[in-house]
Image: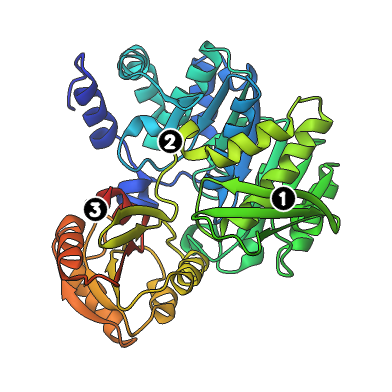
Amino acid sequence: MKPIVPGYAETLDYLYERLPMFQRIGAAAYKANLDNTLAICKVLGNPETKFRSVHIAGTNGKGSTSHMLAAILQSTGLKVGLYTSPHLQDFRERVRINGKLIPQKHIVQFVAKHKTAFEAIAPSFFEWTVGLAFDYFASKKVDIAILETGLGGRLDSTNVVTPVLSVITNISPDHMNLLGDTLEKIAREKAGIIKPHVPVVIGETQAETEAVFLSTARLNESPIIFADQHWNAEPEKENTRPGLYVSLTRNGLPSYSDLECGLKGLYQLKNIATVMEAVEQLQLMGFRITEKDIRKGIAYVSVMTGLRGRWEQLSASPLTYADTGHNEAGIREVLRQFDLIPHSQLLFVLGMVNDKDIDKMLSLLPVTAEYFFCAASVPRALHPAILQESAGKYGLKGEVYPTVKDALHAAQEKARQLDLVFVGGSTFTVADAL
């Protein structure tokens, strides 16, 4: 066993190398119960009971929704914890208070203090980090924490909290080897975050999943609200400014106009509607959230929380974007964005992971694009030659590159003035590009 020594780099080495980590190895790191997390919380004095929280699950959009809601609450003057995963560049992105990363020193001290007790529990990387986050938020006395589930909901390590509000953004096919092979089964796992008498906001009404949420809410006597049945978000008409400006109606009546969104992807319209309903539920609980707070939080979400990788422009010349969409629904949203940007040729830097159903995603991608197949720097990354072979079955053509950096460099070197370069296919591909 590698000994723990004072120092951040060594501490991270211990966490990464000693512990099963889904981000790196996939299903082998997934724990199908909450026993370890409950044991960790007991060791820590049950920090999950010492702060209010909003618990957010969903297949797509839960990260953007979490960050926007955190930014809005920060704008009110509250001390807001934010727990998300995975990180893109720095482990500390997972745990923030008012947008500030958890200090390196705190992580080193936490691991050193609890290493012996935790090793007796044999937790995963994710269980360790949930314990770290909950302990940090409790010790710093946050007013509220926004907690994003990692995978699923019912058995996710974050699901030991009793929040003031639960949010489920949507359900799409993803992690079907662990969560179930139908939308209904996946919805049952996500619905596991619904707690007795705690209101739950569902972002999107879907025929395959609506009954699951309604029945689970009824069993828990939890008020349930479907955001898209009340809110509608559309791009502002005749807007010539760069960026995304939104017009919102509530129950068919004008509610907000010219709402600037700091996240540029058109798919954020769904997330904004979900956020608005979550805000309304918090207001009903007594949270003082003004229109000014809402506008500031949504407009400056990236600045206030550090969120990256959501239809993010990496360069203007050549025009280069990256997006973390990594499943069928996410890819469909990315394709919609391509249609909105006038371009001559699309150069697609593509990397995927080896435990996904990649065929559905590949079948959606444009055959007219030129592909730069690559592998992100995680063990789960699909070998680019295998990806190239699979893509070829769908008429997708391009060369193989050993790293994301190599592929992106080649694409940008080849791009002409009116071409569009895009990086995606996996969160980890985007992480390497950043």
User: Mark 2: which amino acid?
Assistant: Gly
**What label does residue 379 carry, if any?**
3
Q: Position of residue 403 (x, y in %)?
A: 16, 58
User: Mark 1: which amino acid?
Assistant: Ser
What residue sits 16% from the left and 75% below the top? 399
Structural distance between the alpha carbons of marks 2 and 1:
26 Å
- Local SS, label 2: loop
Q: Nearer the viewer, mark 2 or mark 1?
A: 1
Q: Position of residue 77 (x, y in %)?
A: 63, 19
**Circle count:** 3
Q: Nearer the viewer, mark 3 or mark 2?
A: 2
Labels 2 and 1: the sequence-earlier one: 1
- Determine whether label 3 and label 2 are within 8 Å by CB: no
- Local SS, label 3: loop
Position above or below: 207 against 112: below
Q: Nearer the viewer, residue 183 or 278?
A: 278
User: Mark 3: which amino acid?
Assistant: Pro
Q: Which residue is mark 2?
A: 306
Labels 1 and 3: the sequence-earlier one: 1
Q: Nearer the viewer, residue 108 or 428?
A: 428
What residue sits 48% from the left and 70% below the top? 340
What residue sits 36% from the left and 18% below the top? 103
**What label does residue 257 carry, if any?**
1
- Mark 3: few/some/many CA within 10 Å (<14, 14-19, 20+): some
